[in-house]
Image: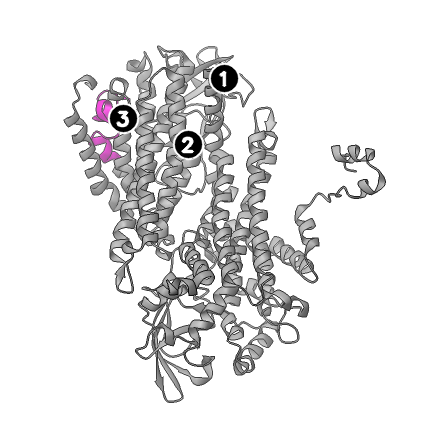
Amino acid sequence: MKALTHLDVAKRHLPMIGRLMVRKRYGDFWEEETRTLPWPFGGLRRKYKAFADEYIRPRALGVDQDVSALDKEWLFTEYARRGWASELLPWPIGGMKVAALRSYGLHAALKMEELCAACGGIALMLGAHDLGMAPLLMSGDLKVLWDWTIPIYKRLNKGERAVWAFAITEPGAGSDVEETEGALKARVVTRAKRAEGGYVLNGRKVFISDGGIADYVTVFACLGDEGVESWTCFVVESGMKGFTKGRREKKMGQKAGDATELIFEDVFVPDRNRVGPERSGWALNRNVLNFSRPVVGAIALGIARGAFEHCLEFCQNTRQGPRRLVEYQEVQLALAEMMIRLMAGRSLIWHAGRFMPPLPLTSAAAKVFCSDTAVTVCASAMDIMGDHAYMHGNYVEKALRDARLTQIYEGTNQINRLGIIEDMWEHELREV
Amino acid sequence: MGAEMTRDDWAAFQEMASGFAKRSIRPILEHESPDGDLDRVPAVLKEAHETGLLASPDPDAPGFETGVWGRHALSDGPLLSLRLLSELAHACGGVAMSIHAAGLAALVIGMAENAAGLKAGRAAVALSENGFPPGFGTILDPSRAEPARIETVAEHKDGWTLRGRKDFVYLAPETDAFVVFAREGSEWRAFLVPASGEGVRVEDAGHRMGLRACGLKHVILNRARAGDDALLKFARPAPEAVMEYLRTWWLGMAAIGSGIAKSAEEAARGYAEERYQGTTEIIHHPAVNALMLAQARARTESCAAVTERAALADGGARRSLLAAAQAKLTGLSDAAQAVTDSLQVFGGYGYMEDYRMEKRYRDVNTLKGAGGSARDLSLLIARIAEEGSR
């Protein structure tokens, strides 16, 4: 039985209604937060956490050192057979609960925070699949839904393999193509030329998450000699003639999730594989990014939470002189500061999730704030732990490396900040 | 020797260090692994020894006088060694750390009155316990419980017997002795203990974030035996020797951070001048030039300035230690921010191993925690400041 707190004793002096207003603590803040979520998100959050604890957490450090130690096929199947690889649509097509449709952004964010609290890299490997499939849904094209999404989701729900990746970044056009002004000037080289019955694709994409393991890739290409305003999205299938996978990048962190170069040399893509109408790619890309940016914020938040949890455990178990670290006031202040930042980040992500469809402004804000916060929280954890901080076995250095990527992908934080300005004041700025 | 060194001598030494970094250290990084070809590090340090950059306690060694933390530092102060470390770190923070660690051990041995009678080839200093450097109270009295007393104990009976454990000892390859700080009752003592001596066990610290070109070990002393002559006899009070060691250790790390930050900023500037967005090089974008690159440069200069200012601090061991702690705390924070801003200029490429920006990021963040994290330094600064205000 737990000892009484000061408040438990003091509240006896209050009248009954006053006593009822004293908030009872369950002792587990994560659970208390979860209870505030509307149905069915609370239950989902618990399931994601249980999965992360059982399947991801025990493998995180080993995989960071040796990626080949992870059986990706097996893990993805475990993930998919729970219906989580088809959660962009509700039952009976996908694994999403119907009530979760009220915010698919929040849904995805809850999942990624939990998975990333265990390992940012493994979570990226699992979550990038949703990003790859997102253009199918966000095109709003019912033919695409019928031809692609439904059959693929059926296969996934049966436990069959069908991993997707999303490909926009090119060697000479990274964050440029994630912001309007930059995109207009970007040196985009992947092009689709009209051919009988379809298109011929040529070009190159880089840093593609899950590119190395994907069976299908949603690829954005310019039409003919036109600029990025002609962007059109195509499904390129693994095994198509002329489609090869190039180098797998050597990254500082999030190592379990591959970043691979994709090469297109006269790849014939039939009309059936076009996602939405011609020239719909730019708007589609923006739709996808508005959905995915809060999710990247959640990835960052999860990574930072993992660092915080490991740091807290370290402080509870490590003595310095007569006391445990957690008993020193300056350590308590630093831990509290980390918690405040995590709560602020989570609040912003959940706030962004209230906008349906997602608002570019809040999506970008959630991504920027949480990724910057994540790096700050990881660095704060390292500041407490002394020389132990940079040792791999203590986790937080991995978290710092993992978190650093979230300030870069899905548009650098600088590009996202400019995106906020564009979303707020585009007309006024043009008038000026 | 020190009194005879002129500004021209300093410039020549800096040029030599810069040339050595380009000619001998940089090729290590041509290897594709994340930290370069670490198998080449011993050969590079051998070359550093032969060229006189690597200090040694051996009076016949080329770097005895002039190496990083050679005897010139006892008369001329730390400034030249700091500049040399910064030049070396421009190529690789880990190699610079190796040279710093070995040189500093030579300096501590050189501070002893009985240094001439001691035999050591390459040494490393073992002070920290449980991953934390001693706090100010413990420096004054190693048996003091707050924040944590020194648990490595020396007993004198038919020679010296040492018991305890020293953690996170940075060392160069082929280190054959440790300068072990221990306590005898409530007094500090320092011993030169052979790495292969009776009762001495050396364990690898394990996989870590950065500075991997420098060794990192735990030293376990299980009734380790040392002769009477192993005791280092300092002219100054032993706590001051500990302070002098920590001061120099921290200043050196701040200088290494400054070198890493400088190389990161230069690499980012070079990249920004070549990388196009549309028809314009990205260096012409205000977000790149006026924000990230300009701030990286300012922070790099700030790190170098605070380090050099701390190196010139006088007013006794405590004030010098205070200045060094402040330099490591703020200087490395600036250096780390400069490196992360520079990395950001590269976008996704900065996160990949190819451009070595991620290595600089790992190295500088390791430096921040090594031998005294922000918390340790803040506590120490607070305690010394508190003493000063009394």
Colour scheme in the image? one colour
Task: Report how far apart the C-alphas of labels 2 and 3 lie in the structure.
Answer: 18 Å
Disc nearer the start of the sequence (2/3): 3
Q: Is label 2 in contact with label 1 (beta carbons under 8 Å)?
A: no
Disc nearer the start of the sequence (2/1): 1
Which picture quadrant has residue B22? top left
Which disc number belongs to residue B329? 2
Q: Is residue A256 above or below residue A283?
A: above
Q: Residue at x 55, y 21 (%)?
A: B146
Q: Amino acid at mark 1?
A: Pro
Task: Name the residue carrying label 3.
Answer: B79
Q: Is residue A359 above or below residue B39?
A: below
Q: Amino acid at mark 2?
A: Leu
Q: Chain of mark 1?
A: B
Q: Is residue B35 above or below residue A173?
A: above
Q: Of all residues shown, which one is farthest toward the left?
A: B8
Q: In front: A216, or A366?
A: A366
Q: Residues within 10 Å of mark 3 (few under 14, many from 20)?
A: many
Q: Chain of mark 2?
A: B
Q: Is residue B152 left or right of residue B215?
A: right
Q: In front: B378, or B31?
A: B378
Which picture quadrant has residue A274? bottom left
Q: Is residue A363 above or below residue B143?
A: below
Mark 2, mark 1: which one is toward the viewer?
2
Q: Secondary structure at mark 3?
A: helix
Q: Does residue A141 appear in this view?
A: yes
Q: Is residue A55 magenta?
A: no
Which disc number belongs to residue B142? 1
